[in-house]
Amino acid sequence: MQMMRAAVLGQPISHSKSPILHRAAYALLGADINYEAIELTPADAGEFAQQLRANQWAGCSVTMPLKDVFVPLMEEVSDRVARLGALNTIVVCRDGRLYGENTDVDGIVLALADAGVRHSSQATILGAGNTALAAIEAAAELGTTELKLVVRDPARASLAISLAQELGMRVELVEVNSFDELGIIADPLVISTLPPRAADSWVAPLGAGRGILLDVAYDPWPSELAQNWAGTVISGLHMLVHQAVEQARYFSALPFDELTRERVTNAMYHSLGLHRRG
């Protein structure tokens, strides 16, 4: 059987831990998939999508700044991607069609489940970009009805607000520079979707929350936000592992029962020397 290809696409991409995670999964599964990291600009996405259809590709993980760029290049997307307008997974079907999915949502939900969080009627999300959209979808799956959206520029939060409202949430939009520190300190669940170091200047206005913080950033770690948090902190590596498990299921095209999923998840955690919560 010919070796299949898979990769993580983004810019910059040299810091990505996805190759470590996926290689551990495919070694465990015995899947003939070579996984690499490829630096790709938005301008090159169209040409790359064409190459995916013809060169023994199983699929790709997609990160910044490409999550929305690839959506119109897919032949088919999941309902989730259609709602979010962003993907993190490209599956190359056997007939060459490209299918878009967003497993960031699964990553958030399952990382929180490992920490014992399976429901939260209230949540706060920091940021309003593509990862924030996935966090809003994840919050909906957790039963959130009251959402606080903390942003730097309210004018750029319209998509996030619309999605939350579509999912049945009441949204409170807060500009971080006018944030009352007491407003977040008691929130039970906070998800920071900000890029690495972007939250550093948010530490003072946010204060030291006592709830659970999932910080999707993981390099450098701990972040300034995590270091100053008084409650439980979950690194973005936990989210990264769980979203990658779902990608490995798609790329390998192997049946994943619960035992297989657990074995793959634990293998990915082990590959990073990371302790699994739960």
Image (cartoon, rainbow, N blue to C red):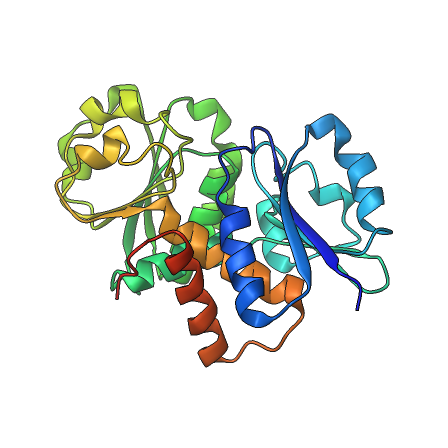
The location of residue 157, given as percent across then percent down, is 47, 31
Image-based side of 139 in relation to 250, left or right: left
Residue positioned 80% across, 36% down in the render: 46
Where is 223 relative to 21, above or below?
Answer: above
Q: Position of residue 276 (x, y in %)?
A: 30, 61
Residue depicted at 35% across the width and 57% down the height: 111
Residue 255 versus residue 28: which sits nearer the camera?
28
Q: Nearer the viewer, residue 3 or 51?
A: 3
Q: Is residue 264 left or right of residue 34?
A: left
For the N terminus, give its image quadrant.
bottom right
Q: Is residue 16 above or below residue 141?
A: above
Quadrant that contains the C terminus: bottom left
Q: Residue at x 43, y 48 (%)?
A: 135
Count every numbered label the image shows and give the total. 0
> Residue 37 sits in which quadrant?
top right
Q: In terms of depth relative to the viewer, which is nearer, 185 or 54?
A: 54
Q: Report whether 50 appears left or right of 117.
A: right
| Res. 180 image quadrant | top left
Displayed quadrant of residue 151: top left
Is residue 68 at least partly visible in the picture?
yes
Q: Residue 138, can we see it?
A: no
On screen, residue 133 above or below 91: above
Residue 222 x/y as whole percent: 26, 36
Q: Nearer the viewer, residue 45 or 74?
A: 45
The x, y position of residue 87, in whole percent, is: 61, 47
